[in-house]
Amino acid sequence: MSDRILTVRVARIARETPDILSFELTHPQGRPLPDHAAGAHIDVHLPGGFVRQYSLARASVQGTRSYLIGVKRETQGRGGSASMHARVREGDLLPVSAPRNNFPLRREAAHHLLLAGGIGLTPMLAMAQSLRAQGGSFTLCVFARSREHLAFAASLGDPALRPFVRLHIDEGKVDERIDLHALLAAQAPGTHAYLCGPTGFMAAVRDAAAASRWPEEQMHAEYFAAPAESAPLAGRPFALRLTQRGIDVPVAADQSAVDALRAIGIDVPVSCEQGLCGTCVVEGEGQAAEHRDFCLTGAQRQHKVALCCSRAKGDALAIAL
Ligand code: FES
């Protein structure tokens, strides 16, 4: 997790949909909070010992008086969202990390296509607000089952954003679903697409992108959970070469690099331990790695490695530790 921990007060809890609550978090003494770029998230330390990452749903346009997060109650989850819904009340104090951003807007994009499924709207809303404030070119496509399941409806209806928002509400009908392939194929060259949402939505967009030959470096994704088909942690044993220390650390077949380092007293900061958040990423010999993360771009993978999940392709992997 991030080394910098702040304490925030839960200033307001609002029901967004039957299964999503929004939480507005402020400094306990009313001071400004650390600024962040759109796409950032914070780690929230929850009652029950859970630590969960939540995207910030509001851009830091003119200073940051509060953080806004949305939490969907996951019935099949690991307990974090249930704890947030059942145990956190207005007025409570919560430890959170300073904002971190693995999902930034790309300056080089000629147009930004923001694709938000369900609760995946949270980082996209901050991106849309930020782009609107900067005069950037963007479209925010929001996919929801029904109007009842549309979170942050008031923000989407803001007159400043409304002209850039496309709502896709399918009411669960297959024939009402948008043709993602056609949507992507209609974009101008130089468009960057950003996607965030449930795993089925992410897979559908990825499939459409592959069918449209969408350039990989122009597609950016923020996952809430590792896709079901992701590779298991285990693999072949290998040597983790620590170039700054000049030692090799053996990583067993059923061990992660983080665990192997921990066993010899080297603590690497971690948060999600699923390859999602980027906390454990270090510089390293990326081309020698079997990357199993969901947070690094193709270019970053040339020289970075997420230690919680990635392994060596061969017998050894050198990292800058
Ligand atoms: S701890 Fe989150 S990517 Fe490794």
Image (cartoon, rainbow, N blue to C red):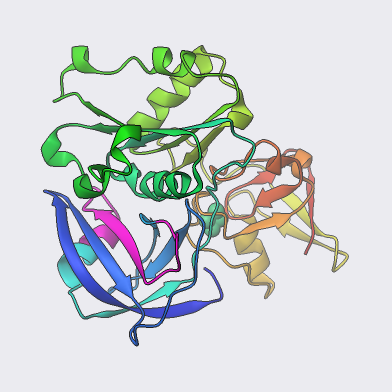
- Left or right of residue 201: residue 138: right
Q: Is residue 169 magenta?
A: no
Q: Which range is magenta?
A: 59-82
Q: Can residue 79 be spotted in the picture? A: no
Measured as percent of width and height from the top left, residue 203 is found at 41, 27
- Left or right of residue 293: residue 318: right
Locate residue 176: give its quadrant: top left
Query: Vertically, is 40 above or below 76?
Result: below
Q: Is residue 80 magenta?
A: yes
Ligand 1 quadrant assignment: bottom right
- Left or right of residue 73: residue 251: right
Measured as percent of width and height from the top left, residue 133 is found at 45, 49
Judging depth in this view, the residue of 192 and 165 nearest the camera is 165
Measured as percent of width and height from the top left, residue 273 is found at 50, 56
Judging depth in this view, the residue of 277 and 14 nearest the camera is 14
Query: Vertically, is 153 above or below 95?
Result: above
Query: Vertically, is 144 above or below 11?
Result: above
Q: Residue at x 49, y 19 (%)?
A: 187
Judging depth in this view, the residue of 33 and 291 nearest the camera is 33
Query: Vertically, is 174 above or below 47?
Result: above
